Image (cartoon, coloured by chain):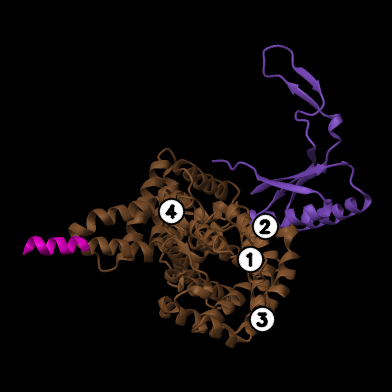
Amino acid sequence: MTGTTGATDATDAREAVTRAHHEEWARVVATLTKRFGDLDIAEEAAAEAFAAAVEHWPADGVPPNPGGWLTTTAHRKAIDRVRRENKRDDKHKEAQLLSDDERPEPVGAIEDDRLRLFFICCHPALAPETRVALTLRMVGGLTVPEIARAFFVQETAMGQRITRAKAKIKAARIPYRVPDAQDLPARVSGVLAVLFLVFNEGYLATGPDSDPVRQDLTAEAIRLARLIRTLMPQDGEAAGLLALMLLIEARRSARVAAGELVALDEQDRGAWDPGLIAEGHRLVRERLATGQAPGRYQVLAAINAVHTSARDYRDTDWTQIVALYDQLVRLDRSPVVALNRAIAVAELDGPNVALAAVDGLADRLDGYHAYHAARADLLRRLGRSGESRAAYDRAIELAGNTAEVAYLTRRRDQLV
Amino acid sequence: MQYLFSVIAEGPAQATQEEQAAVDVFNDRVIAEGHWVFGGGLGETVSATVIDSRGAGEPIFSDGPYVESKEYLAGFWVIEAADLDVALKLAAEASHACNRKVEIRPFLQPE
């Protein structure tokens, strides 16, 4: 009996550590970064505190306030490290540390600290791939080997990237704060771009050895998007990005079958996740109700809301989708947006009109697989098989996602 | 915290009259706001001399810049700023004023 209980307790304790890691990691790192003004110390101390939890909770039981236990433990570890490093220094610093120790933490400030953590990790003075790595490490709590695996980078290289970033933040004094009102929109969109990059890598994973959909990455991106939404409840684009991710994620299990991508018109809509769709729709409606002009993530979310509202592909409200794309084109001049608009136009005005629009993007999108895939599909619908085949060939050559390659190959081979 | 703002130029080193006027306005502002430490434009790279006195013998002088490249250092500022965000804003204005790229690097902090 005792043995069984012990085993259950140990399992419970391990689960408690996992849960705490999800819920408390960013908070612990954020609080310590504020206290010690150093990401490196915060990261190391947080990692040590979680290691201590793994060691102690199964034996001693899960503390009543896991977050508090972790913060206190990490804080102690950080002070130990600072003391070790300051051994030669005078007693003055130590006295200061001790008095800091006594300072009560204002309750509301912790939320802001996690927001600060996002902003420092996604700072524009850091390279985009560094922002991604640093955010996943500091806010997401992923380990360096996990991040390295996620982006097919050598572990040592990924470790160096993160170390160099921390060194730059310290040496160049990248501030740990929420940016001024004037800079805020650009900086928020920088944070959201990092999260969308993580999501997209999961959603359309590249690399011949990669799973076509990397649920670990989409799930992590959604988790972080939920967090940023909680931290900035008034921000329309944060809500829009979360809604967009949820509505794409909802279709995940229908999107790939037997290693092949399933196009929207062929997906089993019964396999879509109604919970995620409902949540995404709720967010889109909430943003519409504000009456504020939407940003690009909100418009993209609205487009996906229209798609996920149709019970059958043929019920899709293409007029509304094209109208939303018109709105998006005004916000985002990228040729990729124009391409997606053209694909929607095909459903409304026919493949001929759409093909003319797609062909107009040739000089800017010739290296992009989706451009050739879209052309191939339109040419197929127009019965121009030879040209369609050539376009499929180009698309297959350029596509990085294994499920997409499989899909494009089948479509090409079905041409008559 | 002090930052070095290096002005990276390609093409003519001499500022045009408009550029010089814009730089003067920028300088007046950073002086007034307490960010100014030092700054100035540099003579053309052909006026450079490299000195190597690491060895025991006489110093060696060589004519011309240490690195021959298309892009070169045309001038610099040393700017006092609370943190990189403040420095980045000033650098954006500096780059706009002198119409050239600007690289920011922090001075080493005393340990």
The x, y position of residue A231, in whole percent, is 50, 72
> Is residue A409 toward the left or the right of residue A110 in the image?
right
> Is residue B96 toward the left or the right of residue A19 in the image?
right
Q: Do the residues marked 3 and 1 share a common chain?
A: yes
A94 drawn magenta: no
Quadrant for the N terminus of chain A in the image:
bottom left
User: What kind of residue is marked 2?
Assistant: Val
User: Which of the 4 image quadrants contains residue A413?
Assistant: bottom right
- Which numbered disc covers residue B86? 2
A7 drawn magenta: yes
Compute the Cα span from label 4 to label 1.
48 Å
Marks 4 and 1: CB-CB under 8 Å? Answer: no
Give the letter of the chain under mark 4. Answer: A
Compute the Cα span from label 3 to label 2.
50 Å
Identify the residue under disc 4. Answer: A42
Marks 4 and 3: CB-CB under 8 Å? Answer: no
Compute the Cα span from label 2 to label 4.
24 Å
User: Which of the 4 image quadrants contains residue B74?
Assistant: top right
Q: Which secondary structure class fits the magenta region best?
A: helix
Q: Nearer the viewer, residue A103 or A58?
A: A58
> Is residue A61 toward the left or the right of residue A87 in the image?
left
Identify the residue under disc 1. Answer: A374
